[in-house]
Amino acid sequence: MLRLLSIRNFVVVDALDLELDGGFSVLTGETGAGKSILLDALGLLLGDRFEPRQLKPGAERAELAAEFDIDGHAVIAAWLALQGLAADGSTLLLRRTQDAQGKSRAWINGRPATLAQLKEAGEVLVDLHGQHAHQSLVTTDAQRTLVDAFGGFTTLARETAAAWRAWRVAIERRDQAAAAQEATAAERESLAARQKELSALDVSAAEWASLAQAQSRLAHAAALLDAAAAGEDELTEADSALARRLSSLIARLDAGAVHDPALKDVIALLEPARIQMVEAARELRGYRQKLDLDPAELARIEERQAAIHDAARKYRVRPEALPDLLAQTDAQLAALAQAADGDALAKRAAAAEASWRRLAGELTKKRRFAAHELEGRVTQAMQELAMKGGRFEIAVVPLATPTSHGVEQVEFRVAGHPKQPLGPLAKVASGGELSRIALAIQVVTSEVGEVPTLIFDEVDVGIGGAVAATVGRLLQTLGKRRQVMCVTHLPQVAAFADAHFRVTKHGDDASVHAEVEALANAARVEELARMLAGSAITAKTRAHAKELLEQHRRAAR
């Protein structure tokens, strides 16, 4: 639910923080006081577009923020996780800014967000009913979803959608196999020839590296032998070999050390070098003995390299990639073999279709039953809301083409009075009627609805007296299950609220600003009295206001 709405430098608001609880809350105030500003600000946080006039004159930047408690709201939690916008705890924070240059930015839980993401979040957080945005009940998808939720078969609807997707995949595979049957035969022949050639070649990436190393060594064997022999000779065999000369030097220094022991430190440094020279000569001797000068082995290796090079050149890959090409060829042949089985693919498509039609047929039966039950309850509620003789109908219209949501579309139709023909809800209902019909629907379906916060604007258009009291009672009832906020001019509606906020506007033509005040006790009675009598408030008006509040308390009990 909405916990906090914070506004800075927006229209005529300098700074405003509106804290809300659950239940039923009302916003009241004189015409033009700025009640719609709060709803406009919330609309912007839910994805509406900023207009330049909405920035407070003289301000550099407007800032809006809303904090929602989403504890137990699995739908929004799952959406946040999918978008990578989840945060610790059960709080969701929306923030939006607009500067004087027209640049707008948005954040969800402190992370940058797009307007599309704000809209998606708004669809599951807030439902606003009135002559404004977020009227989700006028869309056919929302109407169908509402009927499914009211009937308690949303799981069946999801299963039907999954079966439809499986059917479409099966059809696509069947049709692809049929269309490519001739091309598949030629492709299979080419792949089979490539598989046979590469399998016979039987090369591995490790073998290619080993062949390259062996070829280089054998091709330069003579030069390597000469270098090794020269090295051994220079180190130990020649008369002026390095090891011999170093041994002679060490002997002379050793003789001198008899007279000056300091030379022993030098000898200690030279002796390891002599030993290393002798060891290096021994290693070179062993290397010469092991070095192979076999021309036949060199020819065999170069022949193998040539065969691998030819295959790589033929298939336009690097030699070390030939093993991967063989694995790819095997996979393609296996896929073609499966795709070539047209009968099996056709059977799978038919089975998938049968599964979808079975689920869709069951869904149709349940929808018709739930629609009949829901339209009766909403029609009954309309009679109490200044629409005497009005009718609400849910048409379950067959579709010519199968869809993921079944074989029918759901359409809400309404007639506001007995002489009016039924028509689509979005086109027939006026702003006030639409709000009241939405109220009736929300009250009837409140136990199954998923949107936690409902906002009603202008639900009191064209009504008064007992009907207004009925609207207040219904909103109060709805507030026991959901968070409800209502902008109203009717004291009969406001008296039923659990929380009452008054919007006032101060200043002159040069400087105007709006404020919101939470009312309680005497202040609330005074506001109800103003709504009853205007500026001329009397003791009788106050007594009437107190009576309205007492009626609220009795209704709440």
Image: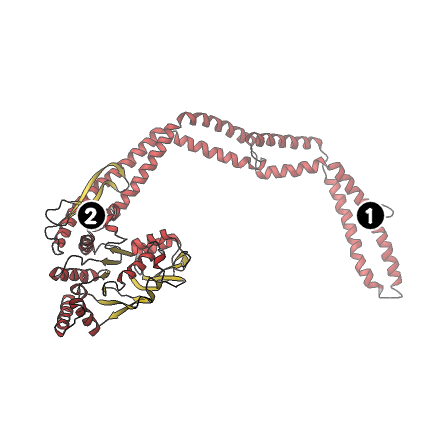
- Binning the other alpha carbons within 10 Å of mark 1 as few (below 14), some (14 to 19) or many (20 upward) gives many
In this rendered view, identify the residue nearer to me: 364 or 470: 470
On the picture, is 322 further left or further right than 102? right
Q: Secondary structure at mark 2?
A: helix
Kind of residue at disc 2: Leu
Q: Is residue 209 left or right of residue 447?
A: right
Q: Are marks 2 and 1 in contact (CB under 8 Å)?
A: no
Question: In the image, which disc is placed on residue 220?
Answer: none
Would residue 271 be found to the left or right of residue 499 on screen? Answer: right
Query: Quick check: 81 above or below 531?
Result: above
Q: In the displayed structure, would residue 302 be above or below residue 277?
A: above
Residue found farthest to the front? 509
Quadrant position of residue 290: top right
Which mark is on residue 236? 1
CA–CA distance in space, label 2 to label 1: 107 Å
Q: Which mark is residue 425?
A: 2
| Residue 381 x/y as whole percent | 14, 54
**Which mark is first along the chain, 1 or 2?**
1
Task: Examine the image and state in which quarter residue 405 appears.
Answer: top left
